[in-house]
Image (cartoon, grey):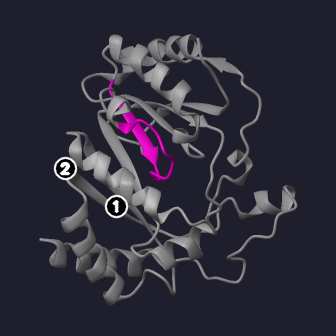
Amino acid sequence: MKKGSVASIETFGLVDGPGIRTVIFLNGCFLRCKYCHNPEMWQMGPLNYTSDEIVQKVLRNKPYFKNNGGVTFSGGEPLCQYDFLLETCQKLKQENIHIALDTAGITKANYEELFKYIDLVLLDIKHLTQSGFQDITNRDYFTQYCQFLTALNKSNVEVWIRQVIVPGIHDNSQYIHALSKFIKENIKHVTRIDFLPYHKLGSEKYQTLNIKYPYQNKEEMDSLQCEKLYQEFLKDYQ
Protein backbone atom coordinates (compact mmCIF):
# COMPACT_ATOMS: atom_id res chain seq x y z
CA MET A 1 0.00 0.00 0.00
CA LYS A 2 1.30 3.44 -1.00
CA LYS A 3 1.82 6.29 1.44
CA GLY A 4 1.67 9.94 0.52
CA SER A 5 2.72 13.32 1.88
CA VAL A 6 -0.49 15.25 2.58
CA ALA A 7 -0.35 18.90 3.62
CA SER A 8 -4.01 19.24 4.58
CA ILE A 9 -7.52 17.97 3.90
CA GLU A 10 -10.40 20.39 3.38
CA THR A 11 -13.98 19.23 3.77
CA PHE A 12 -16.95 20.98 2.18
CA GLY A 13 -14.86 22.66 -0.51
CA LEU A 14 -16.96 24.64 -2.99
CA VAL A 15 -14.48 26.12 -5.48
CA ASP A 16 -12.35 23.16 -6.61
CA GLY A 17 -14.81 21.40 -8.86
CA PRO A 18 -18.58 20.86 -8.97
CA GLY A 19 -20.69 20.38 -5.86
CA ILE A 20 -19.42 19.84 -2.33
CA ARG A 21 -15.94 18.34 -2.34
CA THR A 22 -13.23 16.96 -0.13
CA VAL A 23 -9.97 18.59 -1.24
CA ILE A 24 -6.71 16.70 -0.63
CA PHE A 25 -3.67 18.99 -0.74
CA LEU A 26 -0.57 16.96 -1.63
CA ASN A 27 2.93 18.23 -0.90
CA GLY A 28 5.59 18.60 -3.57
CA CYS A 29 5.95 20.78 -6.65
CA PHE A 30 8.69 21.14 -9.26
CA LEU A 31 7.60 24.66 -10.24
CA ARG A 32 8.37 27.86 -8.37
CA CYS A 33 5.64 30.14 -9.67
CA LYS A 34 6.18 33.77 -8.77
CA TYR A 35 2.58 34.13 -7.56
CA CYS A 36 2.37 30.80 -5.71
CA HIS A 37 0.36 31.13 -2.50
CA ASN A 38 1.36 27.72 -1.09
CA PRO A 39 5.20 27.79 -0.93
CA GLU A 40 5.08 25.60 2.18
CA MET A 41 3.98 22.74 -0.10
CA TRP A 42 6.98 22.88 -2.43
CA GLN A 43 8.82 20.20 -0.47
CA MET A 44 7.48 16.68 -0.03
CA GLY A 45 7.37 16.41 3.76
CA PRO A 46 6.74 13.19 5.73
CA LEU A 47 4.66 10.35 4.32
CA ASN A 48 1.71 10.68 6.68
CA TYR A 49 -1.29 9.02 4.99
CA THR A 50 -1.92 5.68 3.30
CA SER A 51 -4.25 5.44 0.32
CA ASP A 52 -6.76 3.54 2.49
CA GLU A 53 -6.75 6.32 5.08
CA ILE A 54 -7.53 8.91 2.41
CA VAL A 55 -10.35 6.76 1.05
CA GLN A 56 -11.89 6.37 4.50
CA LYS A 57 -11.77 10.13 5.11
CA VAL A 58 -13.44 10.79 1.75
CA LEU A 59 -16.14 8.18 2.35
CA ARG A 60 -17.15 9.88 5.59
CA ASN A 61 -18.16 12.89 3.49
CA LYS A 62 -19.80 10.94 0.66
CA PRO A 63 -23.38 11.57 1.90
CA TYR A 64 -22.79 15.30 1.31
CA PHE A 65 -21.57 14.89 -2.26
CA LYS A 66 -25.11 14.31 -3.62
CA ASN A 67 -25.11 14.00 -7.43
CA ASN A 68 -22.12 16.13 -8.45
CA GLY A 69 -19.70 16.42 -5.51
CA GLY A 70 -16.61 14.34 -4.88
CA VAL A 71 -12.90 14.60 -4.18
CA THR A 72 -10.30 16.97 -5.64
CA PHE A 73 -6.55 16.38 -5.49
CA SER A 74 -4.67 19.67 -5.35
CA GLY A 75 -1.34 20.90 -4.04
CA GLY A 76 1.40 21.64 -4.61
CA GLU A 77 1.40 19.52 -7.72
CA PRO A 78 -0.40 16.22 -7.07
CA LEU A 79 1.29 14.55 -10.04
CA CYS A 80 4.57 14.69 -8.11
CA GLN A 81 3.15 11.81 -6.05
CA TYR A 82 1.94 9.84 -9.05
CA ASP A 83 2.06 6.31 -7.56
CA PHE A 84 0.19 7.34 -4.42
CA LEU A 85 -2.29 9.39 -6.45
CA LEU A 86 -2.99 6.55 -8.87
CA GLU A 87 -3.53 3.94 -6.15
CA THR A 88 -5.83 6.27 -4.20
CA CYS A 89 -7.86 7.15 -7.30
CA GLN A 90 -8.28 3.48 -8.17
CA LYS A 91 -9.73 2.79 -4.73
CA LEU A 92 -11.96 5.86 -4.77
CA LYS A 93 -13.38 4.95 -8.17
CA GLN A 94 -14.38 1.55 -6.76
CA GLU A 95 -16.56 3.56 -4.37
CA ASN A 96 -18.06 5.53 -7.27
CA ILE A 97 -16.49 8.83 -6.19
CA HIS A 98 -16.20 11.71 -8.69
CA ILE A 99 -12.48 12.61 -8.90
CA ALA A 100 -11.00 15.94 -9.97
CA LEU A 101 -7.30 16.71 -10.46
CA ASP A 102 -6.03 20.27 -10.00
CA THR A 103 -2.74 20.35 -11.92
CA ALA A 104 -0.26 22.33 -13.98
CA GLY A 105 0.48 19.15 -15.96
CA ILE A 106 4.26 19.21 -15.78
CA THR A 107 5.29 15.81 -14.41
CA LYS A 108 6.20 12.86 -16.61
CA ALA A 109 3.81 10.03 -15.78
CA ASN A 110 1.62 7.27 -17.23
CA TYR A 111 -1.26 9.63 -17.90
CA GLU A 112 -3.21 7.08 -19.93
CA GLU A 113 -3.55 4.87 -16.85
CA LEU A 114 -4.35 7.76 -14.48
CA PHE A 115 -7.00 9.26 -16.77
CA LYS A 116 -9.01 6.03 -16.47
CA TYR A 117 -9.97 7.19 -12.98
CA ILE A 118 -10.10 10.99 -13.38
CA ASP A 119 -13.44 12.65 -14.19
CA LEU A 120 -12.30 16.27 -14.31
CA VAL A 121 -9.00 18.11 -14.78
CA LEU A 122 -8.70 21.62 -13.36
CA LEU A 123 -5.92 22.82 -15.64
CA ASP A 124 -3.71 25.76 -14.68
CA ILE A 125 -2.40 27.79 -17.60
CA LYS A 126 0.76 29.69 -16.68
CA HIS A 127 1.63 31.12 -20.09
CA LEU A 128 1.37 30.21 -23.77
CA THR A 129 5.03 30.33 -24.76
CA GLN A 130 8.13 28.57 -23.50
CA SER A 131 9.81 31.82 -22.48
CA GLY A 132 6.69 33.13 -20.74
CA PHE A 133 6.15 29.83 -18.95
CA GLN A 134 9.76 29.78 -17.76
CA ASP A 135 9.63 33.39 -16.57
CA ILE A 136 6.55 32.79 -14.40
CA THR A 137 7.46 29.33 -13.06
CA ASN A 138 11.26 29.69 -12.85
CA ARG A 139 11.46 26.27 -14.50
CA ASP A 140 11.80 24.95 -18.05
CA TYR A 141 8.91 22.47 -18.12
CA PHE A 142 6.93 23.79 -21.08
CA THR A 143 7.70 20.68 -23.14
CA GLN A 144 6.33 18.43 -20.38
CA TYR A 145 3.26 20.65 -20.19
CA CYS A 146 2.62 20.22 -23.92
CA GLN A 147 3.06 16.45 -23.55
CA PHE A 148 0.45 16.47 -20.81
CA LEU A 149 -1.97 18.31 -23.10
CA THR A 150 -1.45 15.70 -25.81
CA ALA A 151 -2.26 12.88 -23.37
CA LEU A 152 -5.24 14.79 -21.97
CA ASN A 153 -6.68 15.33 -25.43
CA LYS A 154 -6.55 11.59 -26.11
CA SER A 155 -8.73 10.96 -23.08
CA ASN A 156 -12.37 11.87 -22.62
CA VAL A 157 -11.72 13.72 -19.38
CA GLU A 158 -13.65 16.95 -18.85
CA VAL A 159 -11.46 20.07 -18.50
CA TRP A 160 -11.92 23.26 -16.55
CA ILE A 161 -9.28 25.88 -17.31
CA ARG A 162 -7.92 28.33 -14.77
CA GLN A 163 -5.91 31.35 -15.87
CA VAL A 164 -4.39 33.64 -13.25
CA ILE A 165 -4.34 37.19 -14.65
CA VAL A 166 -1.14 38.95 -13.56
CA PRO A 167 -0.83 42.70 -14.30
CA GLY A 168 1.77 43.45 -16.94
CA ILE A 169 1.75 39.87 -18.24
CA HIS A 170 -1.75 38.60 -19.02
CA ASP A 171 -3.86 41.77 -18.86
CA ASN A 172 -3.72 42.81 -22.51
CA SER A 173 -5.72 42.09 -25.65
CA GLN A 174 -2.80 40.40 -27.39
CA TYR A 175 -2.51 37.76 -24.68
CA ILE A 176 -6.29 37.34 -24.42
CA HIS A 177 -6.57 36.68 -28.15
CA ALA A 178 -3.62 34.28 -28.06
CA LEU A 179 -5.18 32.44 -25.10
CA SER A 180 -8.43 31.95 -26.99
CA LYS A 181 -6.56 30.61 -30.01
CA PHE A 182 -4.35 28.36 -27.86
CA ILE A 183 -7.26 26.74 -26.07
CA LYS A 184 -9.28 26.15 -29.23
CA GLU A 185 -6.31 24.60 -31.01
CA ASN A 186 -4.66 22.65 -28.19
CA ILE A 187 -7.16 21.62 -25.49
CA LYS A 188 -10.25 19.45 -25.98
CA HIS A 189 -13.28 18.73 -23.78
CA VAL A 190 -13.22 22.21 -22.21
CA THR A 191 -16.49 22.98 -20.41
CA ARG A 192 -15.44 25.92 -18.24
CA ILE A 193 -12.83 28.69 -18.27
CA ASP A 194 -12.12 30.91 -15.26
CA PHE A 195 -10.00 34.04 -14.95
CA LEU A 196 -8.50 34.44 -11.48
CA PRO A 197 -7.21 37.94 -10.59
CA TYR A 198 -3.70 37.88 -9.16
CA HIS A 199 -3.60 38.63 -5.43
CA LYS A 200 -1.00 38.64 -2.69
CA LEU A 201 -2.82 36.38 -0.25
CA GLY A 202 -0.23 34.00 1.07
CA SER A 203 2.71 36.33 0.47
CA GLU A 204 3.30 36.53 4.24
CA LYS A 205 4.20 32.82 4.14
CA TYR A 206 7.35 33.70 2.20
CA GLN A 207 8.59 35.87 5.03
CA THR A 208 7.92 33.07 7.51
CA LEU A 209 9.89 30.67 5.30
CA ASN A 210 12.66 33.25 4.76
CA ILE A 211 12.01 33.31 1.01
CA LYS A 212 11.88 36.49 -1.05
CA TYR A 213 8.43 37.04 -2.55
CA PRO A 214 9.05 37.61 -6.29
CA TYR A 215 6.07 39.89 -6.94
CA GLN A 216 6.45 42.07 -3.85
CA ASN A 217 6.32 45.26 -5.91
CA LYS A 218 3.60 44.15 -8.33
CA GLU A 219 0.09 45.49 -7.88
CA GLU A 220 -2.81 43.11 -7.39
CA MET A 221 -5.11 42.60 -10.36
CA ASP A 222 -8.24 44.73 -10.25
CA SER A 223 -11.25 42.39 -10.18
CA LEU A 224 -13.39 44.64 -12.39
CA GLN A 225 -10.66 44.91 -15.01
CA CYS A 226 -10.22 41.15 -14.83
CA GLU A 227 -13.93 40.70 -15.55
CA LYS A 228 -13.68 43.06 -18.54
CA LEU A 229 -10.83 40.95 -19.91
CA TYR A 230 -12.89 37.82 -19.37
CA GLN A 231 -15.80 39.28 -21.36
CA GLU A 232 -13.35 40.25 -24.11
CA PHE A 233 -12.03 36.69 -24.05
CA LEU A 234 -15.54 35.19 -24.32
CA LYS A 235 -16.30 37.25 -27.43
CA ASP A 236 -13.09 36.05 -29.03
CA TYR A 237 -13.50 32.45 -27.91
CA GLN A 238 -17.00 31.94 -29.29
| Residue type (three-letter) at the residue carrying disc 1 | Asp
Q: Quadrant of the C terminus?
A: bottom left
- Which residue does the numbered mark 1 point to in the structure image? 194
- Residue 64 horizontal/vertical position (percent): 38, 20
From mark 2 to mark 1, how far is it between C-alphas? 15 Å
Magenta stretch encompasses residue 89? no
**Crowd class of label 1 (few under 14; some 14 to 19; many from 20; radius 10 Å):** few
- Indicate which disc residue 189 carries: 2
Snapshot quadrant of residue 110: top left
Q: Secondary structure at mark 2?
A: loop
Task: Tell me where residue 81 appears, x and y as whole percent.
Answer: 58, 34
Say which quadrant the N terminus sits in: top right
Q: Position of residue 188 (x, y in %)?
A: 20, 54
In the rendered structure, are the residues bearing label 2 and label 1 in contact, judged by CB atoms less than 8 Å apart?
A: no
Left or right? Give the position of 49 relative to 238.
right
State the mark number for residue 171. none
Q: Which residues are magenta?
A: 98-111
Give the residue at x 24% y 63%: 186
